[in-house]
Image (cartoon, rainbow, N blue to C red):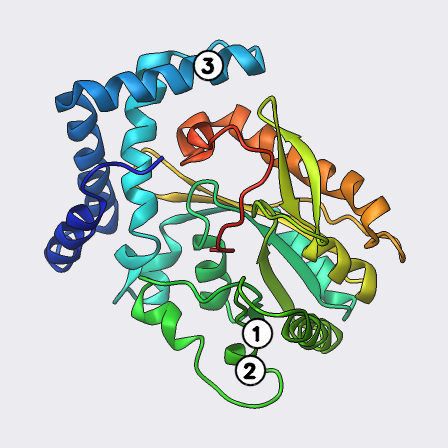
Amino acid sequence: MVRRGLNLRKALLGLILPLLRRSSPETAARVVGGIGRLEYKMHHRLRTTFRAAVERQSAALGANWDVEAVSSALAANQIRFRTRDLLLDGLTDDCAEQLFEVEGQDHLDVALAERRGAILLACHYGAHLLPAHWMYRHKYQLRFYMERPRHVSKYLARQFNGDGPLSQDKLFISRRGDPTSSAGSILRAAKVLQSGMAIYMAGDVRHSGQHAASATFLGRRFQFTTTWVRLAALTGAPVIAVFGRLLENGRYHVCFCRPFQIPQGAGSPGHAAAWVQRYIDILESQVRLDPTNSNDYFFWPDEESSDEPEV
């Protein structure tokens, strides 16, 4: 869902973020969320749209959500989502560490210790860039395999610098790339994994064409990218679903799920769909856990497929 005045809101956030950083990060996050709550309270049409979407999804999932509470909190988190990791700019590692609750770090460490790399399957749920930010703070060797994230912190942007065959700039991709460039990019990603590093990529990107598979998400059918399945099948790297959740107190919960393995040959169109559905089911369980972090999922149009950026 595109909220009215999105560009104006981005400009406003750009102006106030330097001021907000003078307060604690938790306070700044609550103020940003408060903008969303105020907008929800003041605009009848927006409030009606949110309530209808939450009510519809609650019924579809057989959940028993408090529609008003979830709608208001979802409006707040949508604005916090737009700030990405900007509120963490300028913080020392020790200060930043206090903002994270991390679950499943042992899953990540055990997988990387096998020296086969790891595919960290992220998504647009909650604070989707914050797990990567936390990993960089902890000196994990990580590369993004997606379109270059925009409007991120200076800290995160600095991690994209460097040169060499495995440098980050060669891993950023474009959804408008031709088949030749696409094949080249997946081979570069494979080399990164073979070096023992982690690849950070999105598993919830709606896509169409040869490298897409249909899956049921929140009661509807969509076409999702199968790139991650192909890469995992090609390299044998373990796959770890990772989620960053915005907490009401202004902090973040990061979860690294238990790794799973994609068998060789599963990247073919006839086999990839089952693995895509498996991941989408994991994602849906997170939405059930906390629908206030669902961001735009409840507002996706009823289309079988829709190409979109991978960030």
SS for dot 1:
loop
Q: How many marks?
A: 3
Q: Which mark is residue 171?
A: 1
Going from N to C along the chain, the mark reached first, 1 or 3, is 3
Does residue 45 show up?
yes
Q: Which residue is drawn at 31% across and 65% down?
A: 153
The image position of residue 28, as x and y in percent, is 20, 47
Asked whether 254 or 264 is in front, the reply is 264
Identify which amino acid the numbered label 1 is placed on. Leu
Q: In this view, does 154 lie above or below 286?
A: below
- Residue beneath label 3, please? 56
Judged from this view, the residue extending furthest toward the bottom is 164
- Residue beneath label 2, please? 167
Q: In this view, does 274 lie above or below 146?
A: above
Q: Residues within 10 Å of mark 1 (few under 14, many from 20)?
A: many
Distance, label 1 to label 3, CA atoms, is: 39 Å
Question: Where, by quadrant of the figure, is residue 34 drawn?
Answer: top left
Distance, label 2 to label 1, CA atoms, is: 7 Å
Q: Which mark is residue 50?
A: none
Distance, label 3 to label 2, CA atoms, is: 44 Å
Q: Viewer-nearest of labels 3 and 2?
A: 3
SS for dot 2:
loop
Asked whether 119 or 50 is in front, the reply is 50
Q: How crowded is mark 2: few (under 14 residues within 10 Å), some or many (20 or more)?
A: some
Asked whether 244 or 217 is in front, the reply is 217
Residue 74 shown left or right of residue 101 in the figure = left
The image position of residue 3, as x and y in percent, is 26, 36
